[in-house]
Image (cartoon, coloured by chain):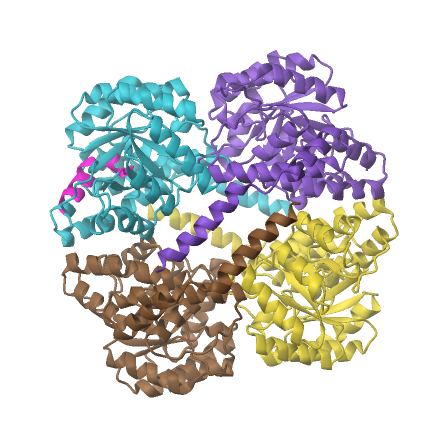
Chain colours: A cyan, B purple, C yellow, D brown
Amino acid sequence: MNRTIASLQGIYVPNIAPYDAQGRLDADLLRRMVEWLIDKGVSGLYSNGSLGEFIRLSYDERKRVTQIIAEQAAGRVPILAGAAESNMEMTLSMCRHCADFGCRAVSLTGPYYYKLSQESIEEYFRQIAVASPIDIVIYNIPMFASEISVPVLTRMALDCPRIIGTKDSSKDLCRFMHVNHAIKDQRPDFANLVGWEELLVPSLLMGGDGGTLSTAGVAPEVIMQLYHTARSGDWERAIQMQYRILDVFQAMLSAPNFPEGFRSGYSIRGFNVGPARFPNSRKEKECLAEVQGKIACLLAEFGFPEAAQACQRANDGTFPSQELERIVDEVAAQFFNRH
Amino acid sequence: MNRTIASLQGIYVPNIAPYDAQGRLDADLLRRMVEWLIDKGVSGLYSNGSLGEFIRLSYDERKRVTQIIAEQAAGRVPILAGAAESNMEMTLSMCRHCADFGCRAVSLTGPYYYKLSQESIEEYFRQIAVASPIDIVIYNIPMFASEISVPVLTRMALDCPRIIGTKDSSKDLCRFMHVNHAIKDQRPDFANLVGWEELLVPSLLMGGDGGTLSTAGVAPEVIMQLYHTARSGDWERAIQMQYRILDVFQAMLSAPNFPEGFRSGYSIRGFNVGPARFPNSRKEKECLAEVQGKIACLLAEFGFPEAAQACQRANDGTFPSQELERIVDEVAAQFFNRH
Amino acid sequence: MNRTIASLQGIYVPNIAPYDAQGRLDADLLRRMVEWLIDKGVSGLYSNGSLGEFIRLSYDERKRVTQIIAEQAAGRVPILAGAAESNMEMTLSMCRHCADFGCRAVSLTGPYYYKLSQESIEEYFRQIAVASPIDIVIYNIPMFASEISVPVLTRMALDCPRIIGTKDSSKDLCRFMHVNHAIKDQRPDFANLVGWEELLVPSLLMGGDGGTLSTAGVAPEVIMQLYHTARSGDWERAIQMQYRILDVFQAMLSAPNFPEGFRSGYSIRGFNVGPARFPNSRKEKECLAEVQGKIACLLAEFGFPEAAQACQRANDGTFPSQELERIVDEVAAQFFNRH
Amino acid sequence: MNRTIASLQGIYVPNIAPYDAQGRLDADLLRRMVEWLIDKGVSGLYSNGSLGEFIRLSYDERKRVTQIIAEQAAGRVPILAGAAESNMEMTLSMCRHCADFGCRAVSLTGPYYYKLSQESIEEYFRQIAVASPIDIVIYNIPMFASEISVPVLTRMALDCPRIIGTKDSSKDLCRFMHVNHAIKDQRPDFANLVGWEELLVPSLLMGGDGGTLSTAGVAPEVIMQLYHTARSGDWERAIQMQYRILDVFQAMLSAPNFPEGFRSGYSIRGFNVGPARFPNSRKEKECLAEVQGKIACLLAEFGFPEAAQACQRANDGTFPSQELERIVDEVAAQFFNRH
């Protein structure tokens, strides 16, 4: 079951969007991240995913992100490029842009904002598949964009040569299995990638081809080792490793204001990712600072020295006296409000 | 209860996006629609709402839509301009654009795609409210974008002078009443507009200030009469009229691929609105053609001659023989598949 | 619009289930409540609704509740009796029981637990409607039980003489209007009752026939006055009264562990309703105690002397020193855990 | 990872409720099914689950189902007995009943109908765990009853000796892994059973202890072989077998009116399960008849002779001429309606 012949294989690492102090895209830092990830041995890179805040970038910024990543990678690893735009003309224009810079394929989410019928979604992707100059991966992420049903995906996979795979962030292993079951026999090169790190080992066991995983950018050493261990068939060890990443993934995921938790992870690994593009409240900033210490300590368990230092710093911090005062004030206020 | 002193009052009519045969924005037709609506006596115009497919337009197209509507109206009626963009800088830039063209206020949906905490949403709007050069209406449409909770809306209404009202398309009269209850006593000029035509009369009865209603562009004569009847306190007649618009609204709403049903309505009223920007399947096109006849007949009941003619044409159509053949073929196929 | 000829009209007050110190149904107290409510002039009584915890009573207890209420009322007001059981045989048996005790009609929720198709639900109710010896009200409460769609309800209303009305707790005025719109012209005696007090006035305005409202048992004087005011056509005053009940309804509704907030309301009115049948955590009990003070003060605004006294007692309470200690302990624990 | 020391292990087969022609529980047939399943080598039996329509049985019928199964099994295999009732007293009474008949443990769903806080749910189960005379399995089935969160389950597992395991039908492998991750290190005997057959192999791989699977009653030979294959560590073969059961499970699951599809499966295996307790519409009955043929053919692929015969009979059926007539009639009616 491990001898995949899928078009895309392995771990494609999504970028986060690094900003400078003025909130502009930090191209130099993005290039350094690309170098660092290639150096760590990742299978490929994935631009403009949900982690990369593609929706919060301008059209031109999205174009630049893919260009920077593709140029910096310079063919050393394949690039999967997010190209979802809010209408077909712009999506096709972005597809051409990605093709021009040598990307391996584009990734397209279902349309967002409106609620659309599965029929419309199918028609939309089919028209794109006919016109696109580059291979397409269908990106199912129902928590943010229109779901693409398994029957629709199956029909398109069997009819459209341009549609070479899918990436699934629905956190639903049953769906993942149904996709394999419906498509792989008839189209063995169709790539079935998982977009939820908790399911990496189960999905590989059930015949998956890899994943695009947010944690893979924060701890590429760990995720790549996990992937290769599973691929080698050492399931017992792979499962142990799979369980070890649950806590750090959950800590980054449940931090206030996704993807700030993952951006914190990058920051712990030594990248100055800059301010959040979407604003956080004061309370969320405090919470994020606290969670960052926790993330650091969890990452330190994997033996990253810079994470160990960040964990140490977080633990050295004394209990912030101003917070204690704030709590006492609130208790007092509550008391006097009632009298 | 009818003596509203809200900043915004009456019916603000949202535009649909008209396209030419090549799918480009049809500026001339948009201008003609503005003239037609002002001629019908609408209270104001509303650009780039969900009906107007703002999300499917490019940034530049959105700018043009507001510019065209504002220039054409030329101060005869106030303009409420949709200015929601996917990050704060672009949203503020759009606010300045709307201010430059003399709009009365902008309307901002909650952020879409990501799921955000109410704290982040509040922080986001507060920062915009501080920086915006133009008054703001908070547009709650939870079926498409992040909901804005009543406590968040209330706090902002009481703290931020720039936030002068809300538009609610949640279809939830209880929420509407809670907004009134929490805000109006302390800020009587706060405008509470409904975005669901079925609730126009109930919301006016409960102290609302008007609405932005899709049907108001298809049947402005009817909606304006309904509004004025309710405002005059003739509830018995207003209720009868309210019930009369349910069927045509539901027919346009439930047609395949919103907002195509409403665009069909405009087409029946004599505007050649052009092809759909988002593709429809063959089956959806057939369904839409059928629904269009139904919409025409419902509109005809209000006495619009062009609708009566369209209704007549639809009824004259003979049963399409090719569809009969298709069904017979399918029945036969089903039969032989089993044998 | 106020001249309803519906089979059921007015306010049917649902019971709460009173328990003695051992947690058994308190029949005497239930009888006293019936007397009190009839004395306050309610239109009818409603046994075994969601407020009455019908699902948490045994089959025999449910039978007793209806029997007690019907016997005590003794024909002075009509009884609507909840008769939903988890299979058809038991439901029909309960219908016969309610008929035997002279109830006016039974109320049946959609089936719960399983998710059922609208077709099955329709078939279920049609078979009951044929066999039932008593008139039926279809009770739509989608937050707890299977929704009954408007088309299904409409078909049944037009076909089944035994189905004489509906009660809707979906909080959706649009649905309420669609039911009126689809059924009343063809079957004017069909009763459309609202089950959400915030919508009482809007629903009456739009042609409704009354309601079954939890608040009506806690403040029957207020709800009956509100109902009669609206029925008299004095909408301006009715609306003012409608807004006045929002806060107390929300306070009772959002108290921990529905229907404990409403049971607290009865307790403030002087009924010793006994312990909760479903257990509350220690924290929920503390919260409930606090909310009870708030409910008392809101009820006091309507001029109920016993509520004013309860409000006074709540305000006299000094800030509980043990809670202050608990908070300080928690702050300290948090502090030392980090060091 | 395969050396589980959990209190419960293997496949516990849930019963369906067989009825006689009058719709009464068919005790004899239930006994025969128990014999058949024990003969097929199942690990244990599970009474009164969702498959067994526990909610549609009377309290006395539920008691009888457990009694019949326990008496007939007579200690040859352990019994897990559904004991969820709608209040605590009745639940504890049912627990005592199950203990009296020698069941190994009871299974309790979260409370249904009302929406409850996690705090209340925790308090409810803790009080039961203190008072119950028999071990408890917490049954999470969020599609039908209140979800039990992982933190609540974890706290109870670590505090309450009576709570010895969980059964999860949420179809969510991530949740399953989080339960293992949070509990097993500290309480290795805690049983983590899966309630969704598509996840059997993945859950066993990730350290699960078995399952309660509807398909296990229809095809016990297949499910037991699948279980033993996975337990033996032959993952490659287990995965192939896992994929082979997807289609038949989906066919039974998606048949009209759960659990009728599974009852059809039993019927194909030679058990005359009797009429449905919850009524089906005529259209649903037709659909069920058609699906039954499909289920038979899928079961025939596993080599069951009786299924092969049922499949043959279904295929021999000529296209029902009356359905052809019905379609032609409908086409004609549609045609004439428009003219």
Quadrant position of residue C155 = bottom right
Residue A240, compared with residue C20, is above or below; it is above
Is there any visible trace of residue D84 in the rendered image?
Answer: yes
Q: Residue at image x 34%, y 65%?
A: D315
Residue A336, compared with residue D41, is above or below; it is above
Q: Residue at image x 45%, y 64%?
A: D320
Q: Is residue D101 left or right of residue B240?
A: left
Point out residue B42 in the picture as x, y percentages from the top left corner: 74, 24
Main SS of residues in magenta: helix
Point out residue C118 in the picture as x, y percentages from the top left corner: 56, 59
Q: Residue at image x 50%, y 32%?
A: B111
Q: Is residue A119 left or right of residue C100?
A: left
In magenta segment, residue D77 = no
**In-front residue for pair B310/B261:** B310
Give, as a single range, the part of the protein colored magenta.
A212-229
Is there any visible trace of residue D155 in the rendered image?
Answer: no
Quadrant position of residue A21 = top left
Quadrant position of residue A323 = top left
**In-front residue for pair C259/B138:** B138
Q: Is residue C65 left or right of residue A70?
A: right
**In-front residue for pair D257/D301:** D301
In magenta segment, residue A213 = yes
